[in-house]
Image (spheres, helix red, strand yellow):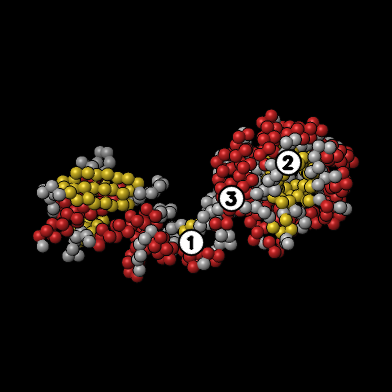
Amino acid sequence: MTRKIDIFDTTLRDGEQSPGASMNTEEKLVVARQLLRLNVDVIEAGFPISSPGDFESVRRIAELAGDAAVVCGLTRAVEKDIDAAADALKYAKRPRIHTGIGVSPSHLRDKLRITEDECVERAVKCVKYAKQFVEDVQFYAEDAGRSDYDFLVRVIQAVVDAGATVVNIPDTTGYSLPEEFGRRIKYLVEGVSGIENVKIAVHCHNDLGMATALAMAGVKNGARQVECTINGLGERAGNTAMEEVVMAIRMHEDELDAHTDINTREFCKASRLVSSITGMNVQANKAIVGANAFAHSSGIHQDGVLKKRDTYEIIDPADVGAGQSQIVLTARSGHAALKHRLEELGYELEGEALDQMYEAFLNLADKKKEVYDEDLESLVNERDRNESAVYTLEGVQVSTGFPLTPTATVTLRNAADQVVTACEYGTGPIDAMCKAVNKIVQVDNDLTEFAVQSVTRGIDALGEVTIRVTDPTGDIYTGRGADGDIVVSSTKAYLNALNRLLNDKQGKRA
């Protein structure tokens, strides 16, 4: 059986300290319920002495959690802090008080202004005081990542002897390199008597972008609890992201001789919830829960993933609640991705037909960042319309503006494969275009309806134009056309309506 690594969530405490991410009590309860669905081992619900709101949050989350998770309240090494935490946790079935003090030369000299002996004395005193209220006491050695190795051993030995059940070794400033931080944890494992009877926890910050790597180095060297947050929220650049460290442990379970009990299928839901409540958006390329985490736009990658998912994905997106892999169609996509998406939409194209569709797709993709399903359906419809067309569009150009006279030049190819060009003026660019088309097609009609709508989202969306024309007998013909240029869309739609009219008249004459 591999080692169980406890997941200590501090989204509601350290995560909330991220500027702009504060939560009220009701919002914290919503997040706490999601943490219970994730099956976290410990919920650090807040810092009770800091405000009445934080006190109430810890109290209500303690009642909510029941036996499902340990509920923890943070304190300084100050008796009134510990009193407040004990009071907030009095209805918790599994309470823990988290108390501690700074241990680095910087903290001792510049913040606390105490000696090493005084630091050890305060550490022991706060642990013993907290033990009067709860059995489960966690001690944090703040800024341990920059502390002297031997002094850190001295402090941890003292609090273990005083009754601490968990010792938290934070890299508070995100300063360490993973290898060095791992050596620090190993030094404690080898140097503190009785350390095997308590849990070593690691709490790492992301100031240098290495929070997850630091936490993993801790686990590899003996830590049995990781402190983390949803989406990596936290002070400054944030904390270790829960979703990252849990999935890293899962991917390397045998190598690390470790596992967690987290319900990973709740990760994406938890990420969206925390983002929604805090207003802190998740970057698209964020590991595990980012919008692009399982998205593929490169043709080579798309081809590999479509053949076998794990050629480019080490995690099944369903395992983290992300649904399925996303094939993002862009100008870098290949035939395989386009064919796959068309088949999903119900269109089966092979050979020359697929090549023609791919050419039309690339022309569109060069104009847009991403091609959506609606765009593809529009391209397929455009292809079907062209197959039965009497006239096809070769080109259209307009000049308009104030005080210019709107002018349109239209070039069409007829059924005899002849290319014909006409130029006309109009009251506007669309009127000029219609007159130019009529000059070539020469079929009586009256444009009775013109409508345009966006096919997809974004400023670069295709515009689909619907045009209805009526012939002298009163018959109505509808045409549609789509393009990123509204004049081109209108020309395609008008020409499509006229082609329908011509085909119908030819059919009646036959």
Give the residue at x 10% y 62%.
Answer: 510
Q: Quadrant of residue 107?
A: top right
Near-viewer residue (117 or 200):
200
Q: Amino acid at mark 3?
A: Glu
Marks 1 and 3, the one that precedes in the sequence? 3
Relative to 477, 187 lies left or right: right
Determine the residue positioned at 13% across, 53% down: 443
> Badge 2: how crowded within 10 Å, few (<14), some, or many (20+)?
some
Give the vertical position of 70 relative to 510 (above or below): above
Residue at x-position 19% and y-position 56%: 499
Q: Is residue 175 visible?
A: no
The amino acid beneath tag 2 is Lys
Residue named by callout 1: 298
Q: Quadrant of residue 336?
A: bottom left
Give whichever of 214, 316 is nearer the camera. 316
Q: Label 2, secondary structure: give it.
A: loop
